[in-house]
Amino acid sequence: MRLLPFTDPSATQVAIAGGKGANLAALTQAGFPVPVGMIVPPVTAEGSRLPVPADLRAEIEVACATGHWAVRSSGTLEDTAAAAFAGQHDTYLNCVGAADVIEHVRECWLSLWSPRAVAYRAHLGLGDDVSMAVVIQRMVFADVAGVAFSIDPVSGNLGHAVINANFGLGESVVSGEGGVDHLIVDKATGAIVEARIAEKTSRVVASDRGTVTESVTNATAPALSPDDVRELVALLSKIEAHYGWPQDIEWALRDAKLWLLQSRPITTIPPRWTRDESGERFPNVVTPLTWDLVERGFHQSLNHSFALMGLPRFDGKWFACFDYYVYGNQNAVELYARRSPVSLAALEDLTQHLPGLLQRFAWVQTLPGEWQAALPAYLAAIERFAAEDIDGYDEARAWDYVQRVNTLGTDYFLPNIAISIGHSVLHRGLQAIVAMSLGPERAEDVTAALVACDTMTAQVNRELSKLATLAGTDEEAFRHHLARFLRAHGHRETDFDAYHPTWQDAPKVVLDLIKTGLPVRNAAQLETDRAGAEARMLTAVPTEIRGFVEQVIALAREYTALDDLEHYHTTRLAPLLRRGVRQIGVRLVQRGILGDPLDPFFATAESLRTAVAANEPARWVALGEEIKKAKAEYLRARGRTPPWVIGEDDAPPPADSVAWTGIPGSPGSATGPAYIVSGVNDFAGFPKGAVLVARTTNPAWTPLFYSAAAVVTETGGPLSHGAVTAREARIPAVMAVRDVLRSVKNGDILRVDGSTGRVFKES
């Protein structure tokens, strides 16, 4: 048998049914209102020029002897997350009788070689290794038809659906010819947010065979009623939930019945650049060279992670630099990183989802072992780079050194975003289970106790505490142990940007941390709290999922340590990059081009590459001028607060503002004087009992938490460094308090309520 009905299990495979056919079969089998149809299995590009085989003709003659049919292309690369192929291949509506269907099946095959399809494949670099299946489907003689998107494809708003509609068949809508109604709808309520009702002067309808265009008498009447809109948006939301990804659908309405004609993933997400996601990771200005060196590796790691998770490839920018500040594409963040892996109404629902969850997140169990297995080779390469004598290198050899170090970093970093995502998924999943088992009011505290573990940051802090004990009692031993400490941990960053010194190059930072005073972490109490929380959890959950919950707890704890450890080892790259760039700078200072050997950080990677390749006096002079200009702009940018959203004006906070709302980060309440910490230079002056106010924090700041009464940051969330460390230190924290740095000054008395996410200024 050559024809496959949509109900055949194998019809959901793209290799057998093509993209469109596989989607329609999957939707049919999931119970969606798809017109009855069947699939002609694919032929290769070469076979598409041959006659329809006799056995296939015979099957079509039986299946399509009567009735009206749509014959639709379904390429194996079509309607997938990689490419939509919208309009590139042919579709034929209202084919009548088997002979008509057979003729148009072959026309669909031949459309593989249409100029537009060939050019489209070439543009995407897909070549001609493609085959074509064909969908044969019962015609729906629509009263109204059109397309709908489960997100706003222009603004990227994930909470809006967009509908285009016209009277008659949907061909007038998808072709872009003539006027169509354009509706923007709130997905949560079904309410129409915006409606542009077009003058629909014509519509496409079925004739005896094929279609014709005819005039419309009620041209300005809405094509859809409010009830129709709500029904369509409800269907659209169900389809999006089924695929776990935003969808672009074709639909038809006939005699008040809604039909689904096609669904494909939305492949282009417009960016919305904000500081929400980037403010914690990149709180300060970033030099052009550092950003150029890390950006490619970051985006490669991102797509490696999405492939592990079975998510579509992301070909846009997740982060981008504007005026020396890094911004995150908030639409992409919401779409990829903050979608729940499964929706549970009650804990008992978890049982039915277990097989799918275990299969979908199998990578979470294997990734830690794979990462650990690759670590020794990375560390050995770091040692070789550190031992390489580059003092005599000219600009070309020093630039080659920088490139080789960066390649090592790109390769090492490939799985690291997956570690961060795994950490986030496990933490959110565990917190949801805790909330359903023990109540939402206890979820934060219990989850924190369950995942508490001995991180690398905690180990470093213990060593700092020992140094603090030696300081002032045994100066010789202190100097000896400090030198050993810097050899071991001197690669730790003072800032994300490799332009800034690490602990090894700025030991005063370590001395300032020691002065803050570091209590030894009570490991026994931590273990007691953890064991008690785990016992309460496992008693509360149903027996049939107890083993799974134990596994989630163990993995969440493992990823908490691993997320911290991978960052610790990532920072080993910074001193090497700084060393190589500085050697370029030394040479340019000798040429009289620059005054500071670290100034090459203000060049772009492309400018440096071009200048090194040319090695001409005029090009070096031009590079020097470019660097001086960029450095001046960087210094100006450093002195201002960046706008929160690119393209939107950030209004200043009200003059009488005395309260702010953020995201709860660590429970509890505390009051103290505000002390703004902008960087490591502020560590030494931090007063015990103050409220630490910052744009964000990083692991090097951890000792400050043991002197602070509370923490307030402009960015971050419950998994940010500030929140995690505040929970460990048992002090309240509120994250993502926008504009707090512009609203608070040192000495203001702040009351921080970490349970509600509120901050109050009391003086």
Image (tube, rainbow, N blue to C red):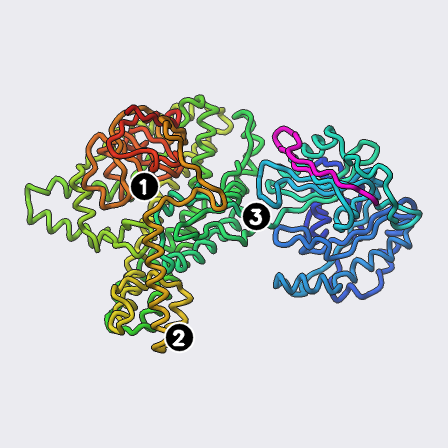
Instruction: Confirm or deny contact between disc 3 and disc 1 (CB under 8 A).
Output: no
Identify which residue is drawn at 54% across, 30% down. 350
Q: Is residue 722 magenta?
A: no
Lateral position of residue 167 relative to residue 301, left or right? right
Lateral position of residue 70 relative to residue 21, left or right? right
Q: Dot 1: what SS?
A: loop
* Residue 613 disc label: 2
Look at the image and give the residue range highlighted in magenta. 183-203
Percent across and percent down for residue 292 are 41, 59
Q: Which residue position holds label 1?
A: 697
Q: Quadrant of the C terminus?
A: top left
Instruction: Confirm or deny contact between disc 2 and disc 1 (CB under 8 A).
Output: no
Label 1 amino acid? Thr
Measured Cα–Cα span from mark 2 to mark 3: 36 Å
Whether residue 362 is visible here, answered yes or no, is no
| Residue 585, image quadrant | bottom left
Label 3 amino acid? Pro
In the orientation shown, which residue stands out farthest toward the right?
Answer: 208
Q: Dot 3: what SS?
A: loop
Could you say which is closer to the camera, residue 745 or residue 348? Answer: 745
Q: Which badge, 3 or 1, is on the more N-terminal residue?
A: 3
* Residue 270 disc label: 3
- Figure check: 96 above or below 195: below
